Image (cartoon, rainbow, N blue to C red):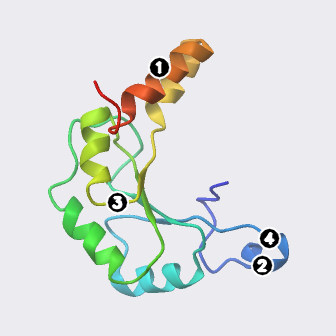
Amino acid sequence: MLLLDLPYDNAFYDEHLELDPILLLSPATTDERVSKIASRGKGFLYYACQKGTTGIRNALPDDFEAQITRIRSHTSLPIAVGFGIADRTTAALVAQHADAFVVGSAFVKMIEENASPDQFKKAAQNFDPRRQA
């Protein structure tokens, strides 16, 4: 579960809930805040690599690799990247530097179009950079 609208220091993340808080980072997150968020995070950190709203983009930001390196300097948690993963090529670029990628908008669009389970399966396979094209 991603609770993206709660600040990292919100009391909701009390250990009594037995939830791993998946906390969000962005290109605008300062180093000080990355350290604080990383110290509270569990499971993995979610890096929204694009500024603005979610959606399919044509390319990763120019500073993508540097941002992942910066985040890694503050944590040993795995890093998942989302916002703008448009296709297998983008997913493969993300996978070179991050531990996981998140695809959202492409699947939301499929839901809107009433895609079948088989279409979802094929789309997921098409995003997987480990599979042959």
Could you give the CA–CA distance between mark 4 and mark 3, rounded to whole angstroms? 26 Å
Nearer the camera: disc 1 or disc 2? 1
Query: Would you name the residue on which mark 3 appears?
Result: 98
Q: Nearer the viewer, residue 123 or 106?
A: 123
> Which residue is farthest left?
62
Marks 2 and 4 in Cβ contact (< 8 Å): no
Nearer the camera: disc 2 or disc 4? 4
Closer to the N terminus: mark 3 or mark 1?
Answer: 3
1 over 77 or under it: above or below? above
Q: Is residue 78 left or right of residue 84?
A: right
> What secondary structure is marked by label 3?
loop
Q: Residues within 10 Å of mark 4 (few under 14, many from 20)?
A: few
The quadrant of the rendering that contains the N terminus is bottom right
Closer to the N terminus: mark 4 or mark 3?
Answer: 4
36 over 105 or under it: above or below? below
> What secondary structure is marked by label 1?
helix
Tag 3: amino acid: Ala
The quadrant of the rendering that contains the C terminus is top left
Tag 4: amino acid: Glu
Q: Position of residue 47 (x, y in %)?
A: 41, 61
Taking the spot 50% from the left edge, 79% from the top edge, the residue there is 38
Q: Which mark is residue 14?
A: 2
Could you give the CA–CA distance between mark 1 and mark 4, rounded to whole angstroms? 34 Å
Nearer the camera: disc 1 or disc 4? 1
Tag 1: amino acid: Lys
Q: Quadrant of residue 35?
A: bottom left
Closer to the N terminus: mark 1 or mark 4?
Answer: 4
Marks 1 and 2 in Cβ contact (< 8 Å): no
